[in-house]
Amino acid sequence: MARELTVAIAGLGAIGLHLARALDAGVEGLRLVAVAARDQDKARANLAGFRTPPALVSLAELAQADVVVEAAPAAIFEQVAVAAIEAGRIFVPSSCGALLPRMHLVARARETGARIIVPTGALLGLDAVRAAAEGEVSSVTIETRKPPRGLVGAPYLDQHGIDVAAITTPTLIFKGNAFDAAQGFPANVNVAAALALAGIGPERTTVQIWADTTVTRNTHTIRVEAASARLTMTIENVPSEENPRTGKITPLSILACLRGLTSTLKVGS
Ligand SMILES: NC(=O)C1=CN([C@@H]2O[C@H](COP(=O)(O)OP(=O)(O)OC[C@H]3O[C@@H](n4cnc5c(N)ncnc54)[C@H](O)[C@@H]3O)[C@@H](O)[C@H]2O)C=CC1
Ligand SMILES: O=C([O-])CC(=O)C(=O)O
């Protein structure tokens, strides 16, 4: 019989709290044992109704679990990642844009025996992109359209004097590669980073970000030209109530990813 994996989560926001609740409700082969939060009182209140409340611990202590899920702001990514990787754990980052400038962590994980598993998150089709990337791929692009409020707070907007609240028609606000997109929009386009990691890397992956007043959903369209196939895929994510930058599917995707770590039947590569 497959052994049970213990799980810890950094951050109890739109992703972390939903994931924690789902794990607490019971998932075969996985046991939530610890969480870390910024606001301890709020976290205690949120955990009070849990069937088996996890321990409320520091970021470093999360690494006691077999699987460490990061669901916190990108600014603390490194703290969570380093502790998990040094302890040889399975590290599952939500803020995967923060991994792009820190690929040395992958080399370090190879030394410590840790694994870094980037979930599909708010995106789709990374199984097909990975398959295509086993062969020849000539181009990978992602076009992201979000309601303007889903882009608020991005450093790129400040740096370029863009006020998304004043936008009244669909406006292309960024065109460049996935590396620069992740730097400029650390809380908005983790999907572009995941796509880049699945496919042909952050320098060759092209990203367009639109502040689109005509959409109510965070909409991502991937286009891949490969020797084996041509892929065009779109996902339209319902923004979560807690954080409109984050699609509701994200914690569900991470849950599906975690199930895949222990399930006997696993579907998709
Ligand atoms: N990979 C993907 O497809 C997606 C990734 N994301 C990313 O996932 C991350 C989390 O997203 P959300 O849950 O929507 O964010 P959120 O803002 O709703 O939640 C983050 C939580 O982390 C907590 N936090 C802040 N500092 C902390 C600290 N020092 N220790 C412990 N907790 C701390 C906050 O209090 C908050 O509860 C973000 O970086 C976001 O950009 C979001 C959507 C999709
Ligand atoms: O990629 C992200 O960071 C979030 C996103 O676009 C979504 O949830 O649709």
Image (cartoon, rainbow, N blue to C red):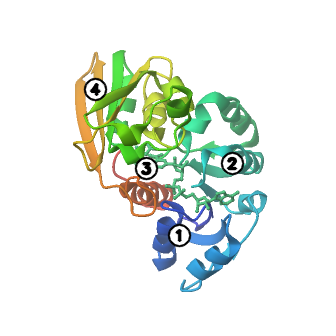
User: Looking at numbered disc 4 in the image, what kind of residue is underneath it?
Assistant: Arg
Residue 103 appears at what percent x and percent y?
Answer: 65, 30
Asked if disc 2 is less than 8 Å from ligand 1, the answer is yes
Residue wearing tag 3: 245
Residue 81 appears at what percent x and percent y?
Answer: 69, 46
- What is the quadrant of residue 147 in the picture? top left
Ligand 2 positioned in quadrant: top left
Indicate left or right for 203 with 99 as reference: left
Of label 4 and label 2, which has the lower sequence position? Answer: 2
Residue wearing tag 1: 20
User: Looking at numbered disc 3 in the image, what kind of residue is underneath it?
Assistant: Arg
Residue wearing tag 4: 223
Could you say whether the residue bearing mark 3 is in a helix, strand or loop?
loop
Residue 44 appears at what percent x and percent y?
Answer: 65, 79
Q: Residue furthest front?
A: 166
Q: Relative to the observer, which residue lies in front, 171 or 25?
A: 171
**Residue for point 54% across, 68% down:** 30
Question: Is residue 27 visible in the rendered structure shown here?
Answer: no
Question: Is residue 259 visible in the rendered structure shown here?
Answer: yes
Of label 3 and label 4, which has the lower sequence position? Answer: 4
Could you say whether the residue bearing mark 1 is in a helix, strand or loop?
helix
Circle 2 packing at 10 Å, graded few (<14), some (14-19), many (20+), is some
Asked if disc 3 is less than 8 Å from ligand 2, the answer is yes
139 up-or-down from 185: above or below: above
Residue wearing tag 2: 76
